[in-house]
Image (spheres, rainbow, N blue to C red):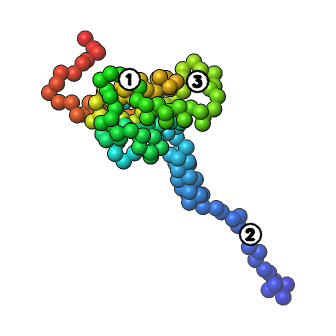
Amino acid sequence: MASEGFIQRRTSKTASLNLTSLMDIFTILVFFLLMNTGDTQELAKANFVKLPDSNADGALHGELVINVGEEFINIDNEDIVAVKDVNTQSGKVNEALSERLQLFATESGELTEAEEKLGRAVTIMGDREVPYDLLKAVMTTCAANGFRDVSLAINQVAADSLLGSVDAGAPAVDGGQ
Protein backbone atom coordinates (compact mmCIF):
# COMPACT_ATOMS: atom_id res chain seq x y z
CA MET A 1 0.00 0.00 0.00
CA ALA A 2 2.81 2.32 0.63
CA SER A 3 3.96 2.02 -2.93
CA GLU A 4 0.51 2.74 -4.29
CA GLY A 5 0.42 6.28 -2.86
CA PHE A 6 3.43 7.49 -4.76
CA ILE A 7 2.53 10.88 -6.23
CA GLN A 8 4.52 12.49 -8.92
CA ARG A 9 5.14 16.09 -8.24
CA ARG A 10 5.28 18.41 -11.20
CA THR A 11 8.02 20.93 -11.23
CA SER A 12 6.66 24.41 -11.66
CA LYS A 13 7.64 26.09 -14.92
CA THR A 14 8.77 29.67 -14.92
CA ALA A 15 6.47 32.03 -16.74
CA SER A 16 7.81 33.21 -20.08
CA LEU A 17 7.12 36.49 -21.77
CA ASN A 18 7.05 36.90 -25.52
CA LEU A 19 9.20 39.97 -26.12
CA THR A 20 8.68 40.17 -29.88
CA SER A 21 5.37 42.01 -29.65
CA LEU A 22 6.68 44.32 -26.96
CA MET A 23 9.77 45.18 -29.02
CA ASP A 24 7.59 45.92 -32.06
CA ILE A 25 5.47 48.35 -30.07
CA PHE A 26 8.48 50.15 -28.64
CA THR A 27 10.14 50.36 -32.07
CA ILE A 28 7.04 51.97 -33.54
CA LEU A 29 6.87 54.34 -30.58
CA VAL A 30 10.51 55.38 -31.01
CA PHE A 31 10.04 56.08 -34.74
CA PHE A 32 6.86 58.04 -34.04
CA LEU A 33 8.60 60.20 -31.46
CA LEU A 34 11.62 60.77 -33.71
CA MET A 35 9.43 61.89 -36.60
CA ASN A 36 7.29 64.22 -34.51
CA THR A 37 10.03 65.89 -32.48
CA GLY A 38 12.27 66.83 -35.39
CA ASP A 39 14.07 70.15 -35.55
CA THR A 40 12.04 71.44 -38.48
CA GLN A 41 9.71 74.36 -38.38
CA GLU A 42 7.05 75.20 -40.90
CA LEU A 43 5.32 78.44 -41.61
CA ALA A 44 1.63 78.63 -42.23
CA LYS A 45 1.55 79.23 -45.97
CA ALA A 46 -1.10 81.35 -47.62
CA ASN A 47 -2.97 79.52 -50.37
CA PHE A 48 -2.26 82.22 -52.93
CA VAL A 49 1.54 82.13 -52.46
CA LYS A 50 3.64 79.57 -54.35
CA LEU A 51 7.15 79.65 -52.89
CA PRO A 52 10.27 79.16 -54.99
CA ASP A 53 12.31 75.97 -54.52
CA SER A 54 15.78 76.04 -52.97
CA ASN A 55 18.19 73.80 -51.11
CA ALA A 56 19.21 76.56 -48.68
CA ASP A 57 19.51 75.68 -45.02
CA GLY A 58 18.53 77.87 -42.12
CA ALA A 59 16.29 77.97 -39.11
CA LEU A 60 13.14 80.03 -39.17
CA HIS A 61 12.95 82.99 -36.90
CA GLY A 62 10.69 85.90 -36.32
CA GLU A 63 7.07 86.14 -35.40
CA LEU A 64 5.98 88.38 -38.25
CA VAL A 65 5.29 86.80 -41.65
CA ILE A 66 4.48 88.97 -44.66
CA ASN A 67 2.83 87.17 -47.60
CA VAL A 68 3.46 88.82 -50.96
CA GLY A 69 1.08 87.38 -53.54
CA GLU A 70 0.33 88.38 -57.10
CA GLU A 71 -2.58 90.61 -56.02
CA PHE A 72 -2.17 91.52 -52.32
CA ILE A 73 0.39 91.96 -49.57
CA ASN A 74 -0.99 90.14 -46.56
CA ILE A 75 -0.11 89.92 -42.84
CA ASP A 76 -1.96 87.48 -40.55
CA ASN A 77 -4.61 86.75 -43.22
CA GLU A 78 -5.37 90.46 -43.46
CA ASP A 79 -4.88 92.17 -46.81
CA ILE A 80 -2.73 95.25 -46.16
CA VAL A 81 -2.28 96.73 -49.61
CA ALA A 82 -2.97 95.76 -53.21
CA VAL A 83 0.16 94.98 -55.21
CA LYS A 84 -0.91 97.39 -57.97
CA ASP A 85 -0.86 100.24 -55.41
CA VAL A 86 2.78 99.64 -54.43
CA ASN A 87 5.19 101.98 -56.20
CA THR A 88 8.16 99.77 -57.00
CA GLN A 89 10.02 102.29 -59.15
CA SER A 90 10.82 104.94 -56.55
CA GLY A 91 11.98 102.59 -53.78
CA LYS A 92 9.79 104.56 -51.38
CA VAL A 93 8.21 103.18 -48.26
CA ASN A 94 4.62 101.98 -48.62
CA GLU A 95 2.46 103.82 -46.06
CA ALA A 96 -0.18 101.11 -45.45
CA LEU A 97 2.45 98.42 -44.86
CA SER A 98 4.50 100.84 -42.78
CA GLU A 99 1.54 101.55 -40.47
CA ARG A 100 0.92 97.82 -39.97
CA LEU A 101 4.60 97.21 -39.18
CA GLN A 102 4.62 100.06 -36.65
CA LEU A 103 1.50 98.60 -35.02
CA PHE A 104 3.19 95.21 -34.74
CA ALA A 105 6.33 96.82 -33.28
CA THR A 106 4.34 98.63 -30.58
CA GLU A 107 2.42 95.45 -29.72
CA SER A 108 5.68 93.49 -29.46
CA GLY A 109 7.07 95.75 -26.77
CA GLU A 110 10.69 96.54 -25.99
CA LEU A 111 13.54 95.41 -28.20
CA THR A 112 15.85 92.70 -26.95
CA GLU A 113 19.62 93.13 -27.11
CA ALA A 114 19.83 91.09 -30.31
CA GLU A 115 16.98 93.05 -31.88
CA GLU A 116 18.74 96.32 -31.09
CA LYS A 117 21.79 95.13 -33.05
CA LEU A 118 20.09 93.29 -35.92
CA GLY A 119 16.64 94.86 -35.97
CA ARG A 120 13.34 93.07 -35.53
CA ALA A 121 12.94 89.79 -37.40
CA VAL A 122 10.52 89.38 -40.29
CA THR A 123 9.95 86.57 -42.78
CA ILE A 124 8.75 87.44 -46.26
CA MET A 125 6.90 84.76 -48.21
CA GLY A 126 6.97 85.93 -51.81
CA ASP A 127 5.19 84.12 -54.60
CA ARG A 128 7.60 82.75 -57.20
CA GLU A 129 5.94 84.91 -59.88
CA VAL A 130 6.31 88.17 -57.92
CA PRO A 131 8.91 90.51 -59.45
CA TYR A 132 12.01 91.31 -57.46
CA ASP A 133 11.21 95.05 -57.50
CA LEU A 134 8.09 94.36 -55.43
CA LEU A 135 10.03 92.25 -52.91
CA LYS A 136 12.66 95.00 -52.75
CA ALA A 137 9.96 97.61 -52.01
CA VAL A 138 8.59 95.41 -49.19
CA MET A 139 12.11 94.91 -47.78
CA THR A 140 12.76 98.68 -47.96
CA THR A 141 9.56 99.33 -46.03
CA CYS A 142 10.51 96.71 -43.44
CA ALA A 143 14.00 98.19 -42.98
CA ALA A 144 12.60 101.71 -42.63
CA ASN A 145 10.44 100.50 -39.74
CA GLY A 146 13.20 98.68 -37.83
CA PHE A 147 12.61 95.20 -39.29
CA ARG A 148 16.13 94.71 -40.61
CA ASP A 149 16.54 90.98 -39.88
CA VAL A 150 14.80 89.84 -43.06
CA SER A 151 14.38 86.22 -44.12
CA LEU A 152 12.89 85.05 -47.40
CA ALA A 153 10.79 81.87 -47.16
CA ILE A 154 11.33 79.09 -49.72
CA ASN A 155 10.28 75.49 -50.31
CA GLN A 156 13.21 73.45 -49.07
CA VAL A 157 14.10 70.64 -51.44
CA ALA A 158 17.08 68.34 -51.73
CA ALA A 159 19.92 69.54 -53.93
CA ASP A 160 19.59 66.40 -56.08
CA SER A 161 16.01 67.24 -57.04
CA LEU A 162 17.08 70.71 -58.16
CA LEU A 163 19.91 69.23 -60.20
CA GLY A 164 17.55 66.65 -61.66
CA SER A 165 15.69 69.39 -63.51
CA VAL A 166 18.90 70.46 -65.29
CA ASP A 167 19.46 69.16 -68.82
CA ALA A 168 21.16 65.77 -68.66
CA GLY A 169 23.45 66.69 -71.55
CA ALA A 170 24.90 69.68 -69.71
CA PRO A 171 28.55 69.41 -68.69
CA ALA A 172 29.17 68.43 -65.09
CA VAL A 173 31.77 69.97 -62.84
CA ASP A 174 34.25 67.36 -61.66
CA GLY A 175 36.57 68.02 -58.71
CA GLY A 176 39.07 65.36 -59.73
CA GLN A 177 41.86 65.64 -62.33
Q: Residues within 10 Å of mark 2 (few under 14, many from 20)?
A: few
Mark 3 residue element: helix
Instruction: Please report whichever mark, 1 or 2, sits nearer to the chain's N-terminal start.
Output: 2
Q: CA distance from mark 1 to mark 2?
A: 93 Å
Q: CA distance from mark 1 to mark 3?
A: 24 Å
Write down the quadrant of residue 75 in the picture: top left
Q: Amino acid at mark 3?
A: Glu
Residue under the image location 33 percent in, 35 percent down: 85
In front: label 1 or label 2: 1
Q: Quick one: 6 or 120, which is closer to the camera?
A: 120
Q: Quick one: 20 or 130, which is closer to the camera?
A: 130
Query: Could you say which disc has been placed on residue 115 in the image?
Result: 3
Q: Residues within 10 Å of mark 3 (few under 14, many from 20)?
A: some
Residue bearing the label numbered 1: 92
Is residue 51 in view from this perspective?
Answer: no
Residue bearing the label numbered 2: 11
Instruction: Please report whichever mark, 2 or 3, sits nearer to the chain's N-terminal start.
Output: 2
Q: What residue occupies the far bottom of the structure in this picture?
A: 1
Q: Amino acid at mark 1?
A: Lys
Residue under the image location 36 percent in, 25 percent down: 136
Residue 128 percent location from the top left of the image: 30, 35
Residue 105 percent location from the top left of the image: 56, 32
